[in-house]
Image (cartoon, helix red, strand yellow):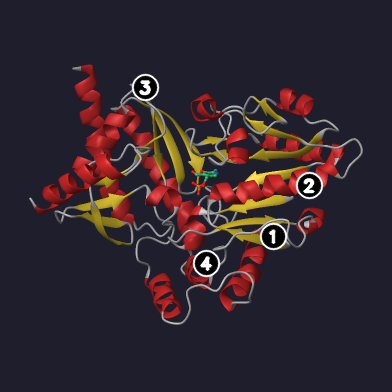
Amino acid sequence: MEGRGLLEELQAIDAQHIMSTYARQPVVFVKGCGARLWDAGGKEYIDFLGGIAVDAVGHCHPRVLHAIQEQAGKLLHVSNLFYTEPQFRLAQKLTVIAGMDKVFFCNSGAEANECALKIARKWGKRKEPPAIEIVAAEGAFHGRLFGTLSVTAQAKYQQPYEPLVPGVRIVPRNDVCSLRKAITEHTCAVILEPIQGESGVHPLSIEFLRTARECCNHVGAFLIFDEVQTGMGRTGTWFMWQQLGVQPDILTSAKALGGGLPVGACMACGEAANVLERGDHGSTFAGGPLVASASLAAIEAIEEEGMLYNARTMGAYLCEQIALWRERLPVTEIRGAGLMIGFDIAEPVAREVVRVALREGVVVNATGENTIRLLPPLNLQQEEADEGLRRLRLAIESAVAERTA
Ligand SMILES: Cc1ncc(COP(=O)(O)O)c(C=O)c1O
């Protein structure tokens, strides 16, 4: 009763005072620990979504909690007009684990990509003739700011805001031939997600990624990998490029980077690392001591608690178990790497599965009518995996049965 009353009150406030951009599920979460969440009525859930890949170290990880508490008692914000130690320690650590030279901190994934695009444009405009074009792939999601929206080639996001930033060329996902044709002397950058997350966990083929690298080298353009979702251990290595062997010039991160707090990073190596100069770009909040402390603590937790290994083994386990469902359920393709998993259901019931899954006590996400996406914490434990799978299977059974009845 307590939970329902609070939910209804918040829904009323939502209707009256919040711009209605989100389709929220009817649940109020009040507490989290590891891969478990509790709602206002005291019901427990297994979190297979991790705040859309943000809660990589689980909810309220003691190390992150301690870092936040300690830093909050000392200093919250002074701006980037001054030095604060956590930002510099984070820069040192992050560039090493990412294999990059330098970083620009910001507050979100879209901002990190915006910075990447600005680096590419500034650099390309110095050439003769100026190279201003950016190549991106169909189905990509790079953010909702004007620059990032312009390379997010999905009509539903772009159409209401046209005209967008000019100079963008879109190629079909994994179409190597179109990619080769699109990258010319006018190109300053190619931006790609190694696995397209938001559009349904679609990995780009190694041939497509290698071709992008090769063509960028050929024309002298930057290759940008948007690892906002695939990075920070999600796919079993710190960043996915490290297992692909295709190195970008610019690498973006956010989501899990802050251990639950909003941090973004645009990293770069080689020439790309030195394009931005004093006054070229900035952000008031970016890299503040609180978020930087949380981020450092999250990185240490991932490192010291073997979460990269856990992401690989637990990810493989989840995929194996879901594959077994095919005997009885219309589960078709299973895609992903590490703990970034998407699978298709032959019936268009994914949104219903999300709803029933909540009733059963597991949080998942639908990226379309047929696709379920799982992004659980990287320290997901065996019993949490088994319990979450059991609940999810029940939800799929129920949604499919209802549809085909
Ligand atoms: C690959 C990718 N890039 C960029 C973004 C945008 O990140 P944010 O919502 O933090 O701006 C997202 C968000 O889902 C993403 O998945």
**Residue 122 marker:** 2
Decide if residue 238 is on the left or right side of residue 213.
left
Q: Amino acid at mark 4?
A: Ile
Q: Earlier in the sequence, mark 4 or mark 1?
A: 1
* The residue positioned farthest toward the top in the image shown: 405
Residue labelled with disc 4: 299
Q: CA distance from mark 4 to mark 3?
A: 38 Å
Q: Residue placed at 42% from the left, 60% from the top?
A: 260
State the separation of the CA atoms marked 3 and 2.
46 Å
Which of the two marks, 2 or 4, is nearer to us in this view? 2
Ligand 1 within 8 angstroms of badge 3 C-beta: no
Tell which of 178 and 112 is nearer to you.
112
The single residue placed furthest to the right in the displayed view is: 128
Quarter of the image containing the C terminus? top left
Disc 3 and disc 1: Cα gap in Å?
A: 40 Å
Which residue is found at the position 36% from the left and 22% from the top? 346
Where residue 23 sits, quadrant-wise, is top left
Q: Which residue is mark 1?
A: 99
Compare marks 2 and 4 and give the one earlier in the sequence: 2
- Residues at circles 3 and 1 in contact by the CB criterion of under 8 Å: no
Label 3: which residue?
346
Q: Nearer the viewer, residue 82 or 138?
A: 82
Residue 1, percent from left and from top: 7, 50
Q: Secondary structure at mark 4?
A: helix
**Element type where label 3 sits in the image:** loop
Whole-angstrom CA distance, mark 2 to mark 4, is 31 Å
Asked if marks 2 and 4 touch (Cβ < 8 Å), the reply is no
- Kind of residue sitting beneath label 3: Ala
Residue 122 percent across, percent down from the top left: 78, 47
Q: Residues within 10 Å of mark 3 (few under 14, many from 20)?
A: some
